Image (cartoon, rainbow, N blue to C red):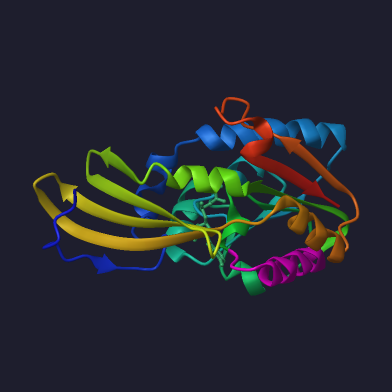
Amino acid sequence: MVSKKIKFVVSHPYTHFALIYDELMGDRYEKLWWKSFLRLSRQHRLKYECIADLAGGTGAAALRLYAPGKKIWIVDKSQAMLRQAKQKLPQAICLVQDIRHFRLPEKVDLVVCMYGGIHYLESLSEVRRFFQAVRRVLKPGGVFCFDQYTLQYLKKLCKQKQRVFEGENYKCYWNMHWDQKKRCAEIHMRGFEGQPRAWQNSWSEKHFHYAFLQKDVKKELKSANFDKIMGNYANKNSKMSQKDNFKLILAK
Ligand SMILES: C[S@@+](CC[C@H](N)C(=O)[O-])C[C@H]1O[C@@H](n2cnc3c(N)ncnc32)[C@H](O)[C@@H]1O
């Protein structure tokens, strides 16, 4: 329980959370999509020298995709997340931008948007504009790879109501709520930094994850001229059936 008397600094998503993001998320999830990505990449003989990682955060995907000689851009609207990315991957060119209207100075072979980046878009028209912007930055024959959680999965996550994460210097409460009307998983995070019983900072961030039906997303991909859509289910370890959790989508 969080006492009502505590004053929280209210910040934009991924400001304070950025400092504990990597410790909290680990590499569990990324290992899963990476396996599927490699399989699809071999199957479709993907070659990429120039990459853009959108909503790239602390650079989890960029780190996997980068190799000496490649060029990688990480786009994210949180400077705090990008600071972490730059520390881990100094070769990356980090751009503080909103993916809803991002621009790159050059075209790339591969665009990725991993770990639910599209769920930050609030409507299908934002998804459409996003896909169109991705299409514009891809070289001919370039590939777009992203993941999408199903509505059932996001809804089910919210059934947990509260989660608590604890580390040596922090404690973080997540209160989760499913908004049926908006089809949105809302996570109200409240964090404490410092030492237990003598916390120095307390902060609060609200994160919103909008769900989209896969058929609608596919339709928007087609309308943005992605004609070839290849998908592959991942997360075989989940208790939910594979088709009910998330999908890795590769589009050309
Ligand atoms: C769950 S993290 C994913 C980070 C990374 N892709 C990964 O695999 O770990 C979501 C990221 O999306 C960023 N983000 C959310 N909405 C955004 C927007 N409209 N434009 C740019 N970045 C955004 C957040 O700042 C955060 O870094």
Q: Residue at x 21, y 59 (%)?
A: 202
Q: Residue furthest top?
A: 237
User: Which residue: 87% across, 37% down?
Assistant: 45
In this view of the protein, which residue sits in the foreground, 237 or 103?
Answer: 237
Q: Nearer the viewer, residue 49 or 20?
A: 20
Where 48 sits versus 243, above or below? below
Q: Is residue 193 left or right of residue 88?
A: left
Examine the image and state in which quarter residue 237 appears.
top right
Q: Position of residue 106 (x, y in %)?
A: 76, 67
Q: Residue at x 66, y 47 (%)?
A: 147
Q: Is residue 240 above or below residue 46?
A: above
Give the dominant element type of the magenta stretch: helix, strand or loop: helix
Magenta run includes residue 130: yes
Residue 103 sits in which quadrant?
bottom right
The spot of residue 186 in percent (x, y) is 44, 58
Residue at 79%, 35% in the rendered image: 40
Q: Which residues are magenta?
A: 121-137
Q: Is residue 214 left or right of residue 151?
A: right
Q: Please tell me whether residue 62 belongs to the stretch shown in magenta.
A: no
Q: Position of residue 247 (x, y in %)?
A: 69, 41
Q: Can residue 139 be seen from the camera position used here? A: yes
Q: From the viewer's perspective, tell me whether residue 181 is left or right of residue 112.
A: left
